Amino acid sequence: MTLTADSKKRVVLPGAAPGDVFACKQKGPELILRRVHRAVPQRKETKADILKAIRNWKSVPNIRWEELRKITREP
């Protein structure tokens, strides 16, 4: 297999995915690439997950809007 670098010294590796990290070692005229880390695709949060996180957030007081208005407004 022959790979060619572009003008920015980039080479496309078959089997590599975006986010993969490789260690590069030079032995004489050869370069040896070894995969160190493969990025795990993160699951996109749904609207239900986000609303559940907001409800469980400790900093949000669990009081009704009318009570909050009475507390924060001057008489």
Image (cartoon, grey):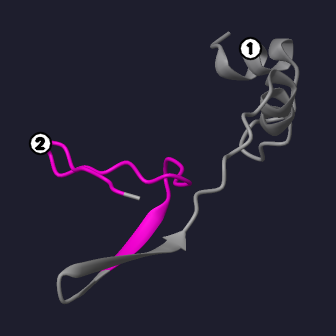
- The percent position of residue 53, horizontal first and vertical second, equals 80, 38
Is residue 42 on the magenta stretch? no
For mark 2, what is the residue? 7
- The percent position of residue 71, horizontal first and vertical second, equals 73, 23
Asked if the residue at tag 1 contacts the one at tag 2, i.e. Cβ–Cβ closer than 8 Å, the answer is no
Question: What span is in magenta?
Answer: 2-24
Magenta region's main secondary structure? Answer: loop
Secondary structure at badge 2 equals: loop
Horizontally, residue 20 falls left or right of residue 33, namely: right
- Report the amino acid beneath label 2: Ser
- The percent position of residue 36, horizontal first and vertical second, equals 50, 75
Which of the 4 image quarters holds residue 7? top left
- Mark 2 and mark 1: Cα distance apart in space: 63 Å
Secondary structure at badge 1 equals: helix
Horizontally, residue 44 falls left or right of residue 14, namely: right
For mark 1, what is the residue? 69
Quadrant containing the N terminus is bottom left
Who's the residue at 78% across and 33% down the image?
54
- Crowding at dot 2, Cα within 10 Å, few <14 / some 14-19 / many 20+, comes out as few
Q: Which one is nearer the viewer's eye here, 21 or 59? A: 21
- Report the amino acid beneath label 1: Arg
**Quick one: which residue is furthest to the left in this view?**
7
Is residue 22 on the magenta stretch? yes
- Crowding at dot 1, Cα within 10 Å, few <14 / some 14-19 / many 20+, comes out as few
Horizontally, residue 63 falls left or right of residue 14, namely: right
- The percent position of residue 19, horizontal first and vertical second, equals 49, 53
